[in-house]
Image (spheres, helix red, strand yellow):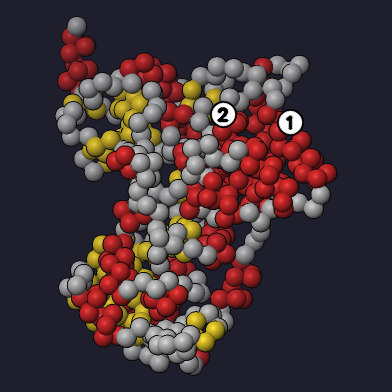
Amino acid sequence: MVARRRIEREFIEVPSHEPVFHPHSFADDAGRLFRWDEKLWRGITHEHASFFDSLFRDGTIQALVDRGLLIETEPTNLALDGYGMVLSHRSVPFISYPNEWSAGMLKDAALTILDLAIELAQQDLILKDAHPWNVLFDWSHPIYVDLTSIAPPENRSTWSAYDEFCRFCYYPLILMSLGQERIARSLLPEYQGVLRSELLTLARGSLPSRFVVQRLVRRCFNSTLPLIGRASHRSALALLKQARRDIETIQLPSYKRRHRRRLLDTMFSPSSESEWTSRPLMLRKILTTLQPGNILDLSRGPTWTTTVPATMGFKVVSIDPDAARISALYETARDKNLAILPLIVDFIKPTPSVGYSDHYSIAATERLKCDLVLALGLTDGIALENHLSLDLIAEGLAAFSKRWLLVGVGERKKGETNGSVYPGPATVRLEDFGAALRKRFSQVSVVSPARSGTLLLCEK
């Protein structure tokens, strides 16, 4: 009795009305994610507390963390009514969704899921959830974040989550390899992902013959059947290893060289070589002065607006509707280990909030807010091509900005839009756009007047 009272005194009770439960964490009977005291925690239900306690005690969780497969997680001395234990998680800076990822990001996320599932299978455990919404990108590094997806095995003859893995990882990647990336990303947020019937229909329209389609189908679906005639432990493990080999063999297009060559000749259109080189230098000076904690790059055009800040040590989220640009940025960030999170998001229609209380998706304007927003080569293009008013553009830029905005105005050649003659004014008037910005920012100042466009620095 004395020992029990001592243990009880060591625990810190979390007031039941203070935790803010994460909107995406509501369906798992093993626990729920919540924020409290500006940190991220997970409550584990009484029914599952002993199982996860044993995984911490035998070192299983720490081994997965050390391998970079699972988010850093530790048991705590917190107590929350209704839960048997409370764990602490390291918080990934920005939430992103699979339909916002490039094909290469989805492939790396799929491999992360399989690597974790293989490691668990070797410990006689399973990964009960295999959809990529349980993976977040810690800049250019995918990491699995849903601890309560780890469970004791129910059926050792196969991987029960394989069908889910196919619908949300394997089939979308096959479509992407066939040039159907836009369709695959559109289907990813759907409740059922990419169905087998949809894959077959789309593949028939993309492949040269029905014989190729049949070989693809056999390759994709034969491995979903239980493996017969082997030891049960090895059956699930063999299936997982085969799935990993299948994912590795998927060939995705690389946009890096093509994108770099194409973009160097478009946007900004500087009138001289010195003006071209002065913009990155100007950006360096501004960043050195402001020292923002994080940056959101909404710029259109060459990728230096993202890579220059990243090579200076700043953390950058880059969004663009151009899959080629985002793919190139991801390959660069991954290869050079830069703190860049590139996402396929369109500024004129960013990912919205979906579901009751954001339970299905949180709006991009909430998830991706940053201290500084960069918007070079953006304003004139969307004003002319997408017919957005200057007020609406300023509203969107302010929605993403916590404090500062660096935006370009008048950056297109007069009379041209994407290389074609535009019938009417080809640039946004500085005076008009400045007036729209002043409604949302307390200070708007010119930092770089130039023949190729003016840079405005705004502060809230």
- Residue bearing the label numbered 1: 222
Query: Earlier along the polypeptide chain: callout 1 or callout 2?
Result: 2
Q: Is residue 95 left or right of residue 160?
A: left
> Label 1 vs label 2: CA separation?
15 Å
- Residue bearing the label numbered 2: 161
Which residue corresponds to the image point at 31% horizontal and 75% vertical from the top-left? 390
Which residue corresponds to the image point at 49% horizontal and 37% vertical from the top-left? 191
Q: Which mark is residue 420?
A: none
Residue 290 placed where, x, y %? 28, 71
- Mark 2 element type: loop
Which residue corresponds to the image point at 64% horizontal and 37% vertical from the top-left? 196
Compare residues 74 and 248 and report the one nearer the observer.
Answer: 248
- Around disc 2, counting alpha carbons within 10 Å, would you say few (fewer than 14), some (14 to 19), or many (20 or more)? some
Residue 371 placed where, x, y %? 29, 63
Q: Is residue 182 left or right of residue 25?
A: right
Residue 96 shows up from this direction: yes
- Around disc 1, counting alpha carbons within 10 Å, would you say few (fewer than 14), some (14 to 19), or many (20 or more)? few
The amino acid on which the numbered mark 2 sits, given as a three-letter code, is Ala
